[in-house]
Image (spheres, helix red, strand yellow):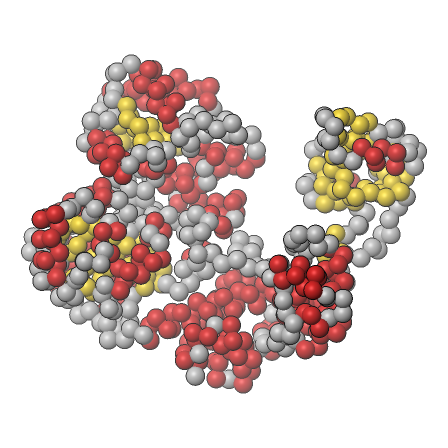
Amino acid sequence: MVDHSIQQLKGIGPKMYEKLSDMGITTLEDLLYYFPNRYDHYEQKPLHELVHEEKVTIVGQVIQEPIVQYYNRKRSRLTVSLRADGAVVKGIMFNRAFAKNHFIPGELVTVSGKWDQHRLQITIDQYQKGTMESNSPITPIYPLKGDLKNSQLIKVITQAIGNKLHTVDDFLPEQYIENYRLPIRQEAIKQIHFPDSFTELKHAKRRFIYEELLIFQLKMQLFRKRNKEATTGNAQQFDQEKVNNLMKQLPFVLTNAQLKSLKEILDDLQSPYRMNRLLQGDVGSGKTAVATISLYASVTAGKQAAFMVPTEILAEQHEHSLRAMLPEDVSIARLTGSVKGKKRKEILQRLEAGEIDVLIGTHALIQDDVHFTNLGYCIIDEQHRFGVNQRNTLKEKGILADILFMTATPIPRTLSITAFGDMDVSKIDEMPKGRKPIETYWVKHNMLNRILSFIYKEMKNGSQAYVVCPLIEESDKLDIQNAVDLYMQLQAALDGKVKVGLMHGRLSNEEKEQVMEDFTSNRIQLLVSTTVVEVGVNVPNATIMMIQDADRFGLSQLHQLRGRVGRGEKQSYCILVADPKGDTGKERMRIMTETTDGFVLAEKDLELRGPGDVFGVKQSGVPEFKVADLVHDYRALETARNDAIDIIVNKRWREKEFTKLFDYIKEEFTLFHDLLN
């Protein structure tokens, strides 16, 4: 490992050291692994080979004197026309009016910048007279801070590679380097900074993509190993006959996907290791039924169970469904923030005395004064709505409690094996029989009157409707109709014929609960809301979901909103109101009207938006990689995961070839020391 200070390099005095340390570079290792984020290469190609919105280089003849437009004293736009490959290309430069004198009609110039294929236009960021060398080097461009120049960093890294590259060890086992035809680490470092060709750069990147993903997957597998080995003696001996009888008495037949997930969960309960499983399934796929059966199994094993949900109204709904499904001799209680005083005290006493089998509640379940006698099973619904600390607090209330996390946000496989790599994942990807697919339509804003007529007609037949919009109040930046305005417009348009309600994030929890209670009990027929309705209540009578400015939402969020309807026997509809300007917005609308499969949509969403915001940027748990990209490097991710499982399951760290890899793992992740001895 190259962990010496960068101060031993020539030219790095106190000022340069300060600039580099501000960027997180203090050792030679930091410096060598500070990779470029892009590359400049002035390769001239014919116009028809240029790629839209990429950086390109064009050699052309200046046709006429450039034109400069001034917007004020500081802002200007220079336009120059060039003849290249028999076509006229327009070059644009901003705030560089002085360059007008450098473009002389009749002379050849070379310009580089972002290419607009549709307009035959280039936004110039660099130019020079005459033609450029066709074999110009590939220049690395680094992310910089402060006044440090790219050329200064190149000079420092060149020196480090020349003097210290030989000290870099390769910790990847030789069999992987050979099998996947990867360059050795020293060569990969050299080529990722200063590639001899784009082919060499591609191979260097392949090397680091696999290396990053393998280290991450090893870390995930070691977490799983540690969690299992720390919780032996946790087997729950439940009554299989009672569980079978419960399933026979259900008013519906479980789907194959539900049965498969249930078997996986019950096997976990019986195993001596602590369950750490994620149950994911589309809205309405029957996760609650699976969770309830498994919860009953734990109760028959003499354990207490906790069911934590994000809102009071959800807790109330789960209580009703559990009481309907479970035998009467199962004692169920509900604990939320609104349960206070004598009633709360009584629940806590009964819980500690072991008189309550199942406790359903919100984050009130994790308060310090909540004590279980024998908590064996925790179910956490819509798990991403709770912070890591909140989830851990509930886990710790039962020393070895099995944990089942549930989410109705379909997670692409790519993310489930990264963000949830330390969990087992069960997936319900089949809808209950007889469920009518929700009909989805994309309409423009100018059809609003026709849509309202349709909604009113449905409500006259006893149905209810949601109208969702993205903002609460006006914004100068976004031309989006807000919830408050729309609420007032709809009230006026419907003129008291139906009761209109309003729901948004600025209401207090009590106010939100009251609005949802009024909507659930049909005292409100049309609910105007921001996305706070995305997770939660089951209103079988609601058959219409109208989403304003739908192109402002991601596919997964649109699908979650659509899942608020279609809960009853009536045909349900989702109406997407949008006038998208860009191709991505149009593509989202098209995909939404073509499929109701949440898992297909989640994969498409990942392609369109990237992995950062499936659950919200900070909560997704998706790691940041220097080179790897979870969407594009999916095959490498699968390969790295399979290799990591093979290494851990077969304890290959004991083999000589794996010594350097596991020395690196121990150095980077000290908490795994004991596991690897």
Residue 50 relative to residue 248: left or right: right
Q: Quadrant of residue 573?
A: top left
Location of residue 535 in the rendering, given as x and y in whole percent from the top left corner: 32, 42
Residue 620 relative to residue 34: left or right: left
Q: Residue furthest front?
A: 14
In the foreground, 421 or 33? 33
| The C terminus, quarter of image | bottom left
Q: Is residue 448 visible?
A: yes
Location of residue 120 in the rendering, given as x and y in whole percent from the top left corner: 75, 34
Q: In which quarter of the image is residue 558?
A: top left
| The N terminus, quarter of image | bottom right
Which residue is found at the position 77% from the left and 26% from the top?
69
Q: How many marks?
A: 0
Location of residue 316 in the rendering, given as x and y in whole percent from the top left corner: 19, 44
Identify whether 341 is placed above or below 403. above
In the foreground, 14 or 249? 14
Q: Residue furthest left?
A: 329
Which residue is found at the position 12% from the left and 59% from the top?
351
Residue 533 relative to residue 189: left or right: left
Q: Quadrant of residue 207?
A: bottom right
Q: Is residue 442 visible?
A: no
Which residue is found at the position 23% from the left and 72% from the top?
234
Residue 491 relative to residue 555: left or right: left
Which residue is found at the position 38% from the left and 27% from the top?
483
Location of residue 88 in the rendering, given as x and y in whole percent from the top left corner: 82, 31
Identify whether 49 is placed above or below 247. above
